[in-house]
Image: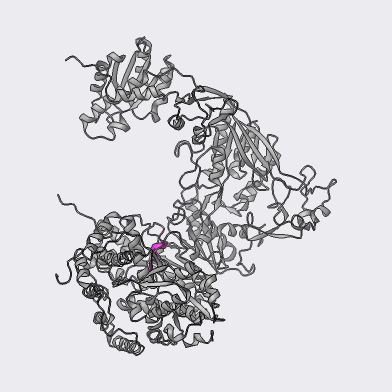
Amino acid sequence: MKQYAYYPGCSLESLATSYNLSTLEVAHNLGVDLKEIKDWNCCGATAYFPVDELLAHTLVARNLALAEKDGLSDFVAPCSACYKNAYFTNAYLKKDPDLAEHINYALEADNLHVNGTMKVRHLIEVFIEDVGLEEIGKKITHPLKGLRVAPYYGCQLLRPRKENENVENPQFFESLLSALGAEPVDYPSKTRCCGGSLIITNRKAALDMVHILLQDAVNRKADVIATTCPMCNVNLEVYQGQVNREFGTQFAIPVMYFTQLMGVALGIKPGKLGIGKELVSGEPVLAFAY
Amino acid sequence: MSIELSFNDEIANVMYATHGNPIKDCLQCGTCSGTCPAVEFMDHTPRVIIGLISAGYKDEVLASNTFWSCASCYHCTVRCPAGIDIADMMYALKRYSIWKGRHQEGLIGPVFSESFVKMIVNSGRSFEPLLAPTYIFKNGPQGLVQEAQTATGLMLKGRLPLLPKKIKGLKKFQNMVRRIIPIGEPS
Amino acid sequence: MSEKIGVYVCHCGTNIAGTVDVKGVAEWAAEHLKHRGVVIGREYKFMCSSLGQELVEKDIKELGLTRVIVAACSPHLHEKTFRTACERAGLNPYLCEMVSIREQVSWVHADKAAATEKSKAVISGGVERVLHNEPLEPIRVPIHADTLVVGGGIAGIQAALEIADAGYHVCLVEREPSIGGHMAQFDKTFPTLDCSACILTPKMVDVGNHPNITLLTWSEVVKVDGFVGNFKATIRKKARYVNTDTCTGCGICWEKCPKKVVDNVYEAGLGNRKAIYTPFAQAVPRYPVIDVENCTYFKNGKCKACQIFCPTEPNSINFDQKDEMLEVQAGNIILATGYDLFDATRIPQYGYGKLPNVFTSLEFERMCNAAGPTEGKIVLRDKTTTPKSVVIVHCVGSRDENYNKYCSGICCMQSLKFAHLVMERTGAEVYNCYIDIRTPFKDYEEFYKRVLEEGGHFIRGKVAEVTDAARLPEEEGKLIVQVEDTLIGKQRRIPVDMVILSAGIEPRHDAKEVGKLFGIACGASGWYTEKHPKLDPVATMTEGIYIAGCVQGPKDIPVSVAQGAAAAARVLGKIQQGVISLEPIKASINETQCSGCRICNGLCPFNAIAFIEDDKVSSINPALCQGCGTCVAACPAGAISGTGFSDAQIIAQIDGLLLRNLEPVEA
């Protein structure tokens, strides 16, 4: 069975433990062997690049080097920010020998060397491409019949563009949700930003952006918003209350990780998927499966 | 013989990994600003910032909150008809601003990023509560109360980290960092 | 017998003389290359002037020069000038060579001493080479008086009429069932707002009736053999399933046909046609065609309504008709195959194909057209509601690194025209969202002013997205256009009923393949490459093949007409000459050395090399050969040599360049 180098990222150990739990459960169920990278460090999300570019890439490269050392071929990140950072650092290492030399000079102090040979994947990509929708369909025991899901892709899963991909109107998330038996909703804001770290650095701006996403999902009569990134999930879910206070709205729409929805459809117990840890309860979703 | 670099050149120099970002090709079409989801909270639109850079209005650019309100969503980048990576340029402006120590008053961004990097260098992993002081007092008393409420909610669900983590190979990690920039205690 | 060589060094004002010591170089040549045959070395301010040329002519006559070297600018500019001068003086023009000491020396070096030495070396190389030159005669081929025009749009129509009116025969081939091209789809043309069909159809009728024009519609060129003056084109005349000898074009068949099909070509997908159809009422020729993909008879043997109701005796419907392959001879070919519209679905954020009331420019033209699917009424997709507000989006797919880098040239005027028509017919509020307003030609800027005066709103900003995700009550049920109004520096959301995308124009989807048929190349953006972008826009690098209209790049109707006429004039000039002179700088194959490996056959970019089966050797057609030298270099047996660039000439030139030809000079 193919082993994937698994890079959970910092938030999966704290704010987004349910993403980690559901990822590991679903991966196990579908036969995807995720091997956590030993002693990985924070990828920096969007916080390193404002300070020093070279340092930012080096800190990301250390994780790539650790994965290469393990002799694995695929680097899998469930968090879109980690994914974007790893993908582009990896791409630059391959394209720019000067950068690679500089970074490896630093990595040498940590007895590491990076070659840029990893194939960087987002978790959702691994499930859709490597396992396949047909295979997943076969293992569904509790199809999410009638569950209207707003597929929230977010930003860094898609952008900046990697090769010639459809970044304006992708459909792969919808396909996955359909395979789970759910009803993906036409969600025009599906690639609109959640604000990311602006939730810290410019609260007003982020709350406005979250408000627009929640309102659009509610307008489209979605029962739940499915996410592919812990930052998006936190902004949409944890701060839903603050959005309500700021804008006088009464949103109470569940926001769940796609892996949690997958897990429910695959018949895994909700508790094992971290369902119940939300500030906006995810319980209503379960009614569609059970 | 010293060469006077234009502001445009200076910013181009702060983009190392994506050297070749053709800011000079800007048509001022406005697609970036028409797309930007955070533009309502910026004092200048992204397009105007590029215009100001071209015109050499360094002070005005550094006094702006535009690039500190950038969420790095990259939507401008993928739509720009001139092929400019505007989000990357925003990062470059942030770096320039921190390097020169010049930015608008009262912004959370600069101190948050610097604290974040320091925290990573000290431990290798992020620990949100350590970063809290950089922003929780900045949104007024109401903001502080709301933050406390959110934090409590998270803690009750076991989602707030109580203890910071450290990576095992921290010493070597710090040596690695120091080969890039001198930061943290010498080993 | 030794040759007598004259060396002439040009000052070119200060272009050369400013860097190279021209006097010194001329003297050096006369002195140090005397033993190689140089009898005179002169320098002059402007060799290309008549006085400069006279210097050469005088020396040929008086000194009996047998070779001439002119050291000046690039041969691209004046090789012909000096060769013609030599010819006038009685010396074979191919015994004159130019060497560049401007583009290759004075314009690229700053070190005067080094530049002067280099000039000497360059001239020395030229001298050695010219000693190996042979007198050559241009190759003359006869020109067949017929012309093949491919493409029946306005440019092709113009070209065909001009040649036919001059008394020569034209075969006009058009892929669609009728001529007319895109111009037949438009409603009004800018800036005069003439009705497009009204100005086009008289020309179409002329073509249909012209005794000198053979019109082959519903036909395509599939093969082209031959060379300038002597082309042979194989044309597939597709089966119409209608006998054109008996058909009167009465229209009963398409009236009675029960099968409606969405017309994606003429009606741009906005309207329908039948399975048997002519594209529009004024079609030339009037004969319909049957679309076998959608015809009930061809799909399952039923119906035959067209045949049943056809009133002619004998019946004009012939389901057994077959494609016909025709061979047409022509001396010259004009390609005028036009453009395709940019596919707006490639920009998902504009909502075309997803949001119903987003239209492309061609759809909107059909909508405005009185004979179109909405009878000229400007309405939403529901075919009933008149819009109260419209946004016209400029630069869709143009000026964009993500799609087409070029400006499509015609869309600004087209957008202004649309704005005018919408305001005139509906009184709606119209917003043009643009980056620049490009209105360069006669009466264009005045038209822009007119639209401003009529109350058109102009927002300078490229539209970021078109969405139906309303955020405010006034946005409900509308299309929201999100754009930065750059003139005021604010992002705006404009709720409207209808959005028109001024999509760019592109080369035809099969332009590359069609170009290969004719042996012409496409540029980086896919438009055909003209011989010279400034001075020769209708000729191509292939003798005898001309291009006219949008096939050469985006342009409006007046320029397309002008290019059609220009191409026609060039062709008429050639026909009148009766013969064409071709440069004798060609490659030729020594048959005794050719092993028949055929490596050269595939390499020739001009399809000039054929394999003679009987002799098992390859042979070069001198009329097609452009003297590029690719085959000369590639032949493993060294069996191909280039007249005018033989191995001996090249090696001699290298020796001269390295100054290996100098004798030690006594002080």
Question: Residue C620: in sight, yes or no?
Answer: no
Q: Is residue B55 above or below residue C84?
A: below
Q: Is residue B28 above or below residue A213?
A: above
Q: Is residue C133 left or right of residue C154?
A: left
Question: Residue B62: in sight, yes or no?
Answer: yes
Q: Quadrant of residue B149?
A: bottom left
Q: Quadrant of residue C663?
A: top left
The percent coordinates of residue C434 (x first, y second) are 45, 59
Residue C591 vs residue C372, the one in the foreground: C591
- Give the overall secondary structure of the magenta segment: helix
Q: How many marks?
A: 0
Residue B17 vs residue A176, the one in the foreground: A176
Residue A283 vs residue C461, the one in the foreground: A283
The percent coordinates of residue C404 (x first, y second) are 46, 53
Residues shaded magenta: B73-80
Colour scheme of this structure image? one colour
Query: Residue lying farthest front?
Result: A1
The percent coordinates of residue C21 (x first, y second) are 23, 26
| C322 drawn magenta | no
Q: Is residue C605 above or below residue C187?
A: above
The percent coordinates of residue C550 (x first, y second) are 53, 46
Q: Quadrant of residue B61?
A: bottom left
> Residue at point 38% right, 83% down?
A238
Please identify the quadrant where the C terminus of chain B is shown: bottom left
